[in-house]
Image (tube, rainbow, N blue to C red):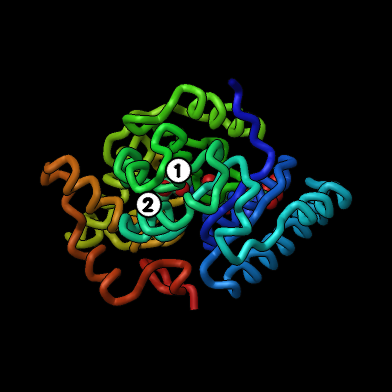
Amino acid sequence: MMIEINRVGVIGAGQMGTGIAQACATAGFAVRLNDRDGKRIDAAVSNIDTTLAKLVSKGKLAQTASHEARERIVPAPSFADLADCDLVIEAATEHEATKRQIFSTLCPSLRPDALVATNTSSISITRLAAATDRPERSIGVHFMNPVPVMQLVELIRGIATGEETYEAARMFVAKLGKTSTMSEDFPAFIVNRVLLPMINEAIYTLYEGVGSVTSIDNAMKLGANHPMGPLELADFIGLDTCLSIMQVLHEGLADSKYRPCPLLVKYVEAGWLGRKAKRGFYDYR
Ligand code: CAA
């Protein structure tokens, strides 16, 4: 039986959750936006208002479409508010215990046939699915940042993910106007297995004094046609997220080539987490 997705719950109103909510609403899905902190839901909705207004002023979105998209987003301060969702996407902090805790407390509030997805960028889908009451209806749906702009969504199947669940997720991504790739459940999947070691190597290049921040970024922007340099991109992703992905690769694949650069560790310890903390490899203050 085909699973139809109309109402989407999003857990976590940070950078990724906000982008996912916006992308779903503009594609016509009803959205329930949840966060344990109600103020973050309000901030996310106001960010979406600003972005939609910009798109309208640039002529990229009609005023009526913007209004309709905005009307589709409903704040959902408690998990009980997600009871009518067909799909719930968890986009909380990249921390395994937090995500497991969310799934185990969330599931009793959901319809038995609802799908659950995680936007994790590296953690095992099989392990996270084991914290739900429905591993066969669980899947990895990994969006890229900034969500409304980036074309790709990685789909990751855990060991128990059912074929119907995968098909429903694939259709959902297509309805968002995005393209999906399929990846098996290995640490950091495809994009971050390739991208993060490159970023980590750029940090080693800085650490070893091979080049300055701007030299490294300009070299990769102008020499490899990357839209952002690796250090600028690390700040954009968040240095805490970069470190946690490198730790998952290092522990999961047990290979020293994935050792997080000590400079990355030091920056995270200092609270220099990149753009969101207004300080990382660049100063945003
Ligand atoms: N909603 C809708 N549209 C948006 C938007 C949003 N939130 N944010 C930006 N845009 C649109 C802008 O309107 C703009 O459109 P036009 O060009 O038509 O005017 C377009 O996106 C580009 O935005 P900007 O002009 O502000 O900036 P830019 O040209 O410098 O591009 C960028 C910004 C798209 C982020 C570009 O620098 C880029 O592609 N960077 C690399 C991003 C990347 O690699 N992301 C993946 C990170 S890894 C990841 O996400 C996985 C993980 O798990 C860590």
| Along the viewing direction, whichever of 187 and 226 lies nearer the viewer | 187
Residue 22 appears left or right of 112: right
Screen quadrant of the N terminus:
top right
Residue 268 appears left or right of 250: right
Q: Which residue is mark 2?
A: 230
Say how many tags the image has: 2
Q: Is residue 78 visible?
A: yes
Mark seen at residue 226? 1
Mark seen at residue 67? none
Q: Is residue 2 above or below residue 27?
A: above
**Where's residue 25, x and y in %?**
71, 47
| Along the viewing direction, whichever of 193 and 198 lies nearer the viewer | 193
Q: Give me the residue at 19% from left, 43% from top.
A: 252
Identify the element where label 2 is drawn: helix
Question: Would the CB of label 2 be found within 8 Å of ligand 1?
Answer: no
| Along the viewing direction, whichever of 281 and 92 lies nearer the viewer | 92
Q: Is residue 218 visible?
A: no
| Along the viewing direction, whichever of 149 and 253 lies nearer the viewer | 253
Residues at circles 2 and 1 in contact by the CB criterion of under 8 Å: yes
Q: How would you rate the neighbour count of disc 2 (Cα within 10 Å): few for under 14, some for 14-19, many for 20 or more? A: many
**Where's residue 224, x and y in %?**
40, 39
Q: Give me the residue at 48% from left, 54% from top.
A: 106
**Residue type beneath disc 1:** His
Question: Would the CB of label 1 be found within 8 Å of ligand 1?
Answer: yes
Q: Is residue 174 above or below residue 280?
A: above
Q: Give me the residue at 65% from left, 70% from top.
A: 42
Q: How would you rate the neighbour count of disc 1 (Cα within 10 Å): few for under 14, some for 14-19, many for 20 or more? A: some
